[in-house]
Amino acid sequence: MTKPNLLIFMVDQLNGTFFPDGPADWLHAPNLKKLAGKSTRFKNCYTASPLCAPGRASFMSGLLPSKSRVYDNAAEFSSDIPTYAHHLRRAGYQTCLSGKMHFVGPDQMHGFEERLTTDIYPADFGWTPDYRKPGERIDWWYHNMGSVTGSGIAEISNQMEYDDEVAYNAKRKIYDLSKGKDNRPWSLTVSFTHPHDPYVARKKYWDLYEDCAHLMPTVSAFEYEKHDTHSKRIFDANNWRDFDITDDDIKRSRRAYFANISYLDDKIGEILEALETTKQEATILFLSDHGDMLGERGLWFKMSFYEGSARVPLMVCSPKMKPGLVTYPVSNIDLAPTLCDLADVSIEEIAPWCEGESLVHLGQGGERTSPVAMEYAAEASYSPMVSLRYGPWKYNRCLLDEDQLFNLDEDPNELINLVNTHKHQGTLNQLRVKSEKRWNLNKFDTDVRESQAKRWIVYEALRNGNYFPWDYQPLQDASERYMRNHMDLNEVENDNRFPRGE
């Protein structure tokens, strides 16, 4: 039986509430809408952790941060943790990554046989938070509200330069795969950094949203003192007191964010066109690592369990799964076993190394009864936070904070904490038992603090004297590119053409 090719599109910081059933009608995203029409769409997919490196490590491994130990954006992703790239490669796949995966540590491959670009963020321990210094801002890399006040039009930026390169290399790889020089099935992961802030966009996409009716948040900002304690920590980490955020700042930021969804749509469309014109078939996945609050409640970026930050889009286009909408809560840790299931890799074989569940049966009319778990233990937290999404409920817990319980069916904006509501005490107790059975928060806290402390020592040592960076360096052998004298010109011209010449 022929194994399917796999094309995985990952984007960065895309708010899943804008994908209630594929892209919202008002988004200018024709390629993603076309893909949605052929896909199983997951309305309630959640990140494993609302931050880049932990969310991505969880997506690749099927493990929550407490198991992967990728607690934050500077925690090493250990080489001995199997990823979907390892599982697929063992099963005979050629595995390739174009773009961001925010691997920290000397292993910059994690099962990928080939990597086409470097990463956009550093691979060392320099971004390590420090629970020993609550309230400290590390100004040179912490988010601040300058992304909001500096929003607007730009024809090139650090982010655009990166994603232009990611798309170019992915498209070129699709053409290379069509040449048939390797008869193995392939898995290509294309991982963009947009629509992650800074909130700047090219004018051609900016102009699409001139009359957009969604440039202001549903829930406006309210007084700092009225926020829950973790949201206050996020405000402080983002240095909000040094910025005066106006409605125009908010509108520009959201407009640029929406424009960058359209920019991504174009890039994805180019890659899908290359796939189509080379007559290759593939199972296609589209997802994000976490969301963005985009000014809801006055919050920006991620680091929160609120829907804008924690909920992400997920679409799977596979002949094994029927197009349609799935409303059961699912998680990014379910993607590793799902990819293996789609590739006919034994789920039993990967189960000992993976906490997630395959989603394939949900695209065949199946059900899900297990809760979805989230964790957060990075900047703006002083102790790990955990969450369970179960049916309509979301239950959040942290040693430092009051518990939170929300009914998302009745309160989608999460404005009413039900922990002290008498009629919901049974639900609260049930979820508390499930949470306490899953997590020992005292041990979790100890593990995170130990990891941070060790990394601060290692980073300081490695920066003293000669420094050897772990950042991935893409390698190209120029002697094997285009035409060289050890090649037959006729074969080169014909083999690199699709369709083939006579």
Image: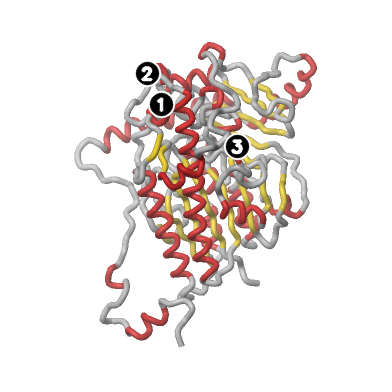
Mark 2 or mark 3: which is in front? 2
Which residue has dot 3 on it? Answer: 311
Q: Residues within 10 Å of mark 3 (few under 14, many from 20)?
A: many
SS under mark 3? strand
What distance separates the C-alpha of mark 2 from that of mark 3? Answer: 29 Å
Which residue has dot 1 on it? Answer: 145
Asked if residue 199 lies left or right of residue 422, the reply is left
Which three-letter amino acid code belongs to the residue tagged 3?
Arg
Is residue 133 shown to the viewer in this render? Answer: no
Which three-letter amino acid code belongs to the residue tagged 1?
Met
What distance separates the C-alpha of mark 1 from that of mark 3? Answer: 22 Å
Question: Residue at left 53%, top 11%?
Answer: 225
What distance separates the C-alpha of mark 2 from that of mark 1? Answer: 8 Å
Residues 31 and 279: in front is 31
Q: Give the mark, 2 or 3, whose residue is nearer the N terminus.
A: 2
Question: Residue at left 58%, top 48%?
Answer: 353
Q: Mark 2 near mark 1, Cβ–Cβ under 8 Å? A: yes
Tell me residue 494's x, y (percent). Answer: 41, 82
Residues 56 and 250: in front is 250
Q: How is the image coloured?
A: secondary structure
Q: Residues within 10 Å of mark 1 (few under 14, many from 20)?
A: many
Q: Mark 2 near mark 3, Cβ–Cβ under 8 Å? A: no
Give me the disc on residue 242. Answer: 2
Give me the disc on residue 326. Answer: none
Question: Residue at left 47%, top 76%?
Answer: 498
SS under mark 2? helix
Q: Give the mark, 1 or 3, whose residue is nearer the N terminus.
A: 1
The outermost residue toward the left is 465
